[in-house]
């Protein structure tokens, strides 16, 4: 930004100039554009459209075969790429898991591995389960479960998402724990077993090859249905520690083939060098049952003989395309042969067969539609001139709508205009520049304020109004120490993550980020837009940010870096809000004693070991919707009398992310009882209740208050 110019002034000036230009251009075009469009249509529409009909009608018949070949050639490439996209993400996940096992060989024998195995399965719809077999014979598996099914006699309910299956090294008992999306246990069962992962094909092959492998199809022990497994070994030093793996059912691959068909009547199969069918786009051909035993189909046992015919009639094995006629019905078919990607290390082939009639049928239908539609247009051209004139004029309407959406901050669809009309081209460029400018300035200025300036047209003036708002301050614990011991780039990256986390939580709760002060964040609720529940929204944003900081700290801990602990102070009060500064430079901010109190409440956290400290005014505004507890009565500099402060632990409603746990609710209840006794000067009774809190959790507030009660009890006259 150029020194001496206010950001808001620049936005207002630039937008007013552009909008004035827009209005002038639109007014001018209403006079000159319509005659131009009508003249162009009268001169070009009829002869051009007649020529187009004749050209398309004659050309379509000659290009049907060529087009069909091109489509199938494209399908060949897309089929190989799509198969890779189906398998490669899981290959990468298994490789990453094996790398983790190589680094921490004992990780997969610990309960911490359940969450990791669940993470391997969750993002991949094609993955049925992820599991690990260890060299001592123990086994852990996370598998998807289907509602209504049964496992070990346990009926799978709608809430159940995964089954945690575990087998100890003695391989006598198989345990299941059924969990929901959040990995909370819902049911469990056990049954005898003799399952030994070390004897399964995925384990033996991965251990023998000492690298990631894709198995041949085999029958899964859990479902009794055929599928493939991607597996990789990991080692403890030079010794094999186990094998990590994930499953893909043949049914999943078959659904994939069905979705990739060239036409509705296409038949696609994947088969190996021996003629066994790995997967088929026809569901009933995935496998067959012989004497109650599941077996793979061969090309000869499919419900259709098209694949077998195509393979038999293929003379040139190097030609991926084959056009042949069915010997029984005489219909013409096009077949395309695509080898599976080299990284599969499997001599499999993807074969797709499509009736040539499917392509010609569409061309014939298109010819008829174009012919009759052309006749209709020729005889009704006067009526349709107006319709097509509006279609040509439509870009102008799109730009007008884009301007309105821009003012209202609605999603702006990209408007691409290529026209010789100077006004339209200039208008399009002006709208793009304005959109980029406003988008950039909303990163510095509250979006609601910019929207207010653009929509109302009121001038920017120094001054503000008194409004009852909620102000939030944050600060990082021991930031000075951290900055002295951390390289600048790393410090900037970590602080930026913290700022991003805080900003998102504030934005989600309709707050306004005022400024960043070093490692501190100042935000407020209730301006520029009114918010009747500003105190509640501020507390929810604080809870969200604290809980998301826990996830950020988990990532930092995984990188071997110290955590970041944020302290938050919140206060509701009447403050001055508006454009504050000088004529040369303004800032939309809040001022007043309430701002200072919010800042001091943030500092109070240090004394009591709390995270979110709020004032009694916040309690009065939103206490009924929050789980909070009184901390103490303190004297705040600049205020007469004592101020009751509270710690916010969670919400009573809202999302799962912000709700208080049962332990937190119990702590709130006991703390309220203890504080009531404290205010009634029943210090011994208060100490007893605070001691109950300490029995539940290591609570710094309880320790501080016990010490304070003890000191006050000793100072009593009868002590």
Image (cartoon, helix red, strand yellow):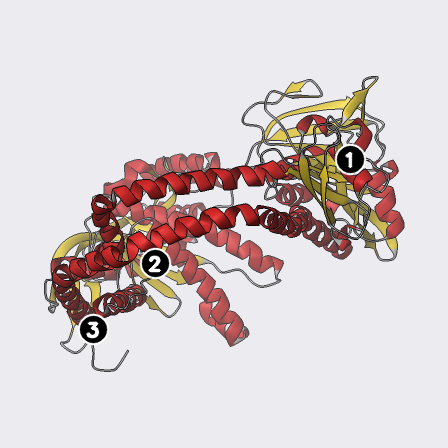
Classify mark 1: residues with Cα within 10 Å, few (<14), some (14-19) or many (20+): some
Judge by depth and name the residue closer to the eye, 67 or 423.
Answer: 67
Mark 3 or mark 2, earlier in chain: 3
Q: Which residue is mark 2?
A: 414
Q: Which residue is mark 1?
A: 309
x and y percent of residue 695 in the render? 52, 38
Taking the image as shown, residue 538 lies to the left or right of residue 223, namely left
Q: Which residue is at a point 58% across and 28% down the rendered structure image?
A: 160
Query: At numbered mark 2, what does the secondary structure look like: helix, strand or loop?
Result: loop
Q: Return the mark for residue 249.
A: none
Q: Is residue 175 above or below residue 505?
A: above
Q: Return the mark for residue 10.
A: 3
x and y percent of residue 585 in the render? 19, 76
Query: At numbered mark 1, what does the secondary structure look like: helix, strand or loop?
Result: helix
Judge whether residue 437 can be spotted in this image: yes
Mark 3 or mark 1, earlier in chain: 3
Query: At numbered mark 3, what does the secondary structure look like: helix, strand or loop?
Result: helix
State the CA–CA distance, disc 3 to disc 1.
73 Å
State the CA–CA distance, disc 1 to disc 2.
50 Å
Tag in front: 3 or 1? 1
x and y percent of residue 222 in the render? 74, 29
């Amino acid at each position: 930004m150029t020194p001496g110019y206010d950001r808001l002034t620049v936005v207002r000036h630039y937008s007013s100039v552009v909008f004035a230009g827009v209005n002038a251009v639109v007014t001018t075009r209403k006079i000159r554009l319509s005659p131009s469009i009508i003249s162009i249509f009268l001169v070009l529409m009829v002869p051009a459209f007649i020529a187009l009909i004749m050209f398309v009608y004659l050309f379509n018949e000659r290009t049907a075969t060529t087009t069909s070949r091109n489509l199938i050639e494209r399908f060949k490439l897309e089929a190989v790429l799509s198969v890779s996209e189906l398998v490669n993400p899981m290959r990468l996940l298994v490789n990453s898991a094996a790398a983790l096992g190589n680094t921490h060989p004992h990780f997969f024998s610990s309960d911490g591995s359940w969450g990791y195995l669940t993470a391997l399965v969750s993002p991949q719809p094609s993955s049925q389960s992820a599991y690990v077999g260890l060299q001592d014979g123990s086994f852990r598996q996370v598998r998807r479960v289907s509602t209504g099914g049964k496992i070990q006699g346990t009926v799978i309910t709608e809430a159940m998402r995964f089954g945690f299956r575990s087998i100890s090294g003695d391989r006598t008992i198989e345990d299941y724990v059924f969990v929901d999306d959040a990995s909370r246990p819902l049911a469990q069962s056990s049954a005898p077993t003799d399952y030994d992962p070390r004897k399964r094909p995925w384990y033996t092959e991965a251990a023998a090859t000492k690298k990631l492998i894709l198995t041949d199809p085999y029958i899964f022990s859990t479902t009794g249905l055929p599928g493939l497994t991607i597996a990789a070994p990991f080692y403890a030093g030079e010794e094999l520690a186990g094998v990590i793996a994930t499953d893909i059912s043949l049914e999943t691959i078959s659904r994939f083939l069905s979705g990739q068909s060239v036409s509705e009547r296409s038949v696609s199969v994947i088969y190996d060098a021996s003629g066994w069918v790995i997967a088929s786009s026809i569901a009933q051909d995935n496998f067959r049952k012989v004497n109650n035993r599941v077996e793979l189909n061969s090309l000869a046992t499919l419900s259709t003989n098209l694949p077998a015919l195509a393979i038999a009639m293929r003379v040139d094995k190097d030609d991926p395309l084959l056009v042949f006629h069915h010997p029984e019905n005489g219909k013409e078919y096009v077949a395309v042969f695509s080898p599976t990607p080299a990284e599969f290390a499997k001599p499999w082939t993807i074969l797709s067969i499509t009736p040539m009639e499917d392509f010609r049928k569409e061309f014939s239908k298109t010819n008829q539609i174009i012919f009759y539609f052309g006749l209709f247009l020729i005889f009704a051209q006067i009526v349709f001139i107006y319709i097509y004139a509006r279609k040509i004029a439509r870009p102008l309407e799109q730009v007008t709508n884009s301007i309105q959406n821009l003012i209202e901050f609605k999603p702006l669809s990209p408007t691409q205009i290529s026209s010789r009309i100077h006004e339209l081209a200039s208008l399009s460029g002006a709208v793009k520049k304005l959109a980029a400018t406003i988008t950039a300035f909303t990163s510095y200025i509250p979006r609601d304020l910019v929207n207010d300036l653009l929509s109302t047209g009121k001038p920017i003036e120094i001054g503000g109004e008194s409004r009852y708002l909620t102000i939030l301050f944050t600060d990082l614990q021991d930031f000075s120490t951290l900055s002295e011991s951390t390289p600048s780039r790393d410090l900037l990256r970590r602080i930026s993550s913290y700022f991003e986390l805080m900003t998102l939580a504030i934005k989600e709760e309709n707050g306004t980020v005022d400024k960043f002060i070093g490692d501190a964040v100042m935000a407020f609720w209730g301006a520029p837009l009114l918010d009747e529940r500003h105190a509640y929204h501020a507390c929810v944003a604080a809870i969200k940010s604290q809980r998301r900081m826990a996830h950020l700290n988990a990532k930092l801990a995984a990188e071997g870096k110290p955590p970041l602990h944020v302290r938050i102070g919140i206060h509701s009060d009447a403050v001055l809000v508006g454009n504050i500064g000088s004529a040369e430079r303004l800032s939309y901010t809040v001022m007043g004693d309430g701002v200072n109190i919010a800042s001091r409440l943030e500092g109070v956290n240090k004394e009591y070991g709390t995270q979110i400290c709020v004032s009694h005014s916040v309690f009065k505004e939103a206490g009924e919707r929050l789980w909070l507890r009184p901390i103490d009565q303190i004297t705040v500099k600049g205020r007469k009398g004592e101020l009751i402060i509270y710690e916010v632990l969670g919400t009573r409603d809202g999302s799962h992310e912000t709700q208080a746990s049962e332990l937190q609710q119990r702590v709130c209840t006991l703390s309220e009882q203890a504080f009531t006794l404290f205010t009634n000067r029943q210090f011994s009774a208060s100490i007893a209740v605070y001691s109950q809190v300490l029995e539940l959790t290591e609570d710094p507030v309880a320790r501080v208050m016990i010490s304070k009660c003890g000191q006050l009890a000793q100072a009593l006259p009868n002590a």
